[in-house]
Image: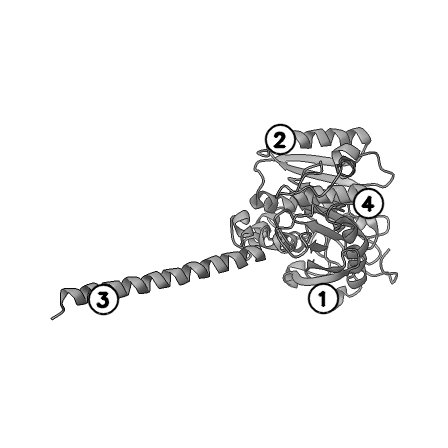
Amino acid sequence: MITQPDTRSRRQRWLRRAAIALGVLSVASVALGAWGYSQGWDRYIHYRHLPDWNRSHEKALLATLTTTPPTSATPTDTGVAAAPSATAAPPSRVDMMSLGNGAVHQESIESPTLGKRLDIRIYLPPGYDDPRFAHTRYPVVYLLHGSPGGDSDWIDGASANQTADALIRSSTIRPLIIVMPDGSLGDPHHDTQWGNSPVTGERVEDAIVNDLIPAIDRQYRTLTRPDARGIGGNSSGGYGAINIALHHPDKFGVVFSLSGYFNAENTYDKRNIWGSDEERNANSPALYVHSLSEPLHIDIIEGQDEGQGVADTKAFDAKLTAVGIDHQTQFAPGGHSWDFWKAHLLDALEYANQHFPATSNGAASTTGQPRDDGRGAT
């Protein structure tokens, strides 16, 4: 027969064990949370969803893009298919739908400017490794993330590879390479604004222009001419893309900004990385934008729920018009979210495709037809 003291003792032992287990679980949760924060897991809260592992985004896009009857590709004077403004003609030699998906690789390049390696994700289009395309060269888009963020954001947050696959496999755009660098330099919470900071000494803009672009052109079959190179991004990545492209119009032919801004700001955690008003003004496109001798095409897509961002975008649009820079500005339903950027990356890539040079000199055609005239890239 169990006595009253035995019952009380058993209950106390059970409570002690439960308290120890709860303590261990709490410590483990804090440790896991701290480690996850350092790895950027909290960005999934920012994404508001987990990565699209079953490729439902691509399937939905393909269903939409392939319901529009394709128009005939118009040959140019050189007999090469011109870039389409909408859906291109079906491939004449290679069925792009048969090539499977593009590939995303995690790599790094040596950056003398930063004194360290720069991590990147690189998207290679369907058919890149197909022997039939061995001499094909591709336009390149450099895609910059916001803050907090890292080189995986455009894949995990916006399924950029699936968007590109759907556009390419439906022959809506020509195959292209997408390069997604880590502007946070290894710490997703380290906001560099993609600039050259006199405060921190980090020269991320110079690293993109002087280190990353040459490395990509050396290692991959790119079209190395500026009008076949684009740069774009979201939020601070959109700001960085506009700032870098306007500083280096000899390097880029197309730039796009999704929910970006046009004045140099403090970082998202309120640090001033610019140091002086002079440096801040030199990195504020709204203040320094001027007419350019090189052709540059700018696409700005802003959410209608962005508040002050809408007014700032309208003011910047007016300045671009005043200085004669070719551009288009769109205001779409939505706000500062990965759902918005995921939806409108498609529009930005179509805009870039429209302004890349017509297929020639071994470039990837809009129809998936590999071409090579023996001269390589221009």
Image quarter (top left, top right, bottom left or bottom right) of the C terminus: bottom right
Indicate the position of residue 85 as horizontal and vertical percent values. Answer: 72, 43
Residue under circle 4?
248
Of pointers 4 and 1, the one earlier in the residue sequence: 1
Mark 1 vs mark 2: in front = 2
Q: Are marks 4 and 3 in contact (CB under 8 Å)?
A: no
Mark 4 vs mark 3: in front = 3
Under tag 2, what secondary structure? helix
- Image quadrant in which you'd find residue 242: top right
Mark 4 vs mark 1: in front = 4
236 relative position to 49: left or right: right
The label on residue 10 is 3
Of pointers 2 and 4, the one earlier in the residue sequence: 4
Q: Amino acid at mark 4?
A: His
Disc 2 packing (10 Å; few <14; some 14–19; many ≥20):
few
Q: Amino acid at mark 1?
A: Asp
Indicate the position of residue 193 as horizontal and vertical percent values. Answer: 69, 45
Image quarter (top left, top right, bottom left or bottom right) of the N terminus: bottom left
Indicate the position of residue 322 as horizontal and vertical percent values. Answer: 79, 28
The label on residue 308 is 2
Under tag 4, what secondary structure? loop
Of pointers 1 and 2, the one earlier in the residue sequence: 1
Indicate the position of residue 47 as horizontal and vertical percent values. Answer: 55, 49
The label on residue 307 is none
Does any portion of residue 54 appear in the rendered image? no
Of pointers 4 and 3, the one earlier in the residue sequence: 3
What is the spatial separation of the Cα atoms under label 2 and label 4, in whole angstroms? 28 Å
What is the spatial separation of the Cα atoms under label 3 and label 1, in whole angstroms? 68 Å
- Image quadrant in which you'd find residue 258: top right
What is the spatial separation of the Cα atoms under label 3 and label 2, in whole angstroms? 64 Å
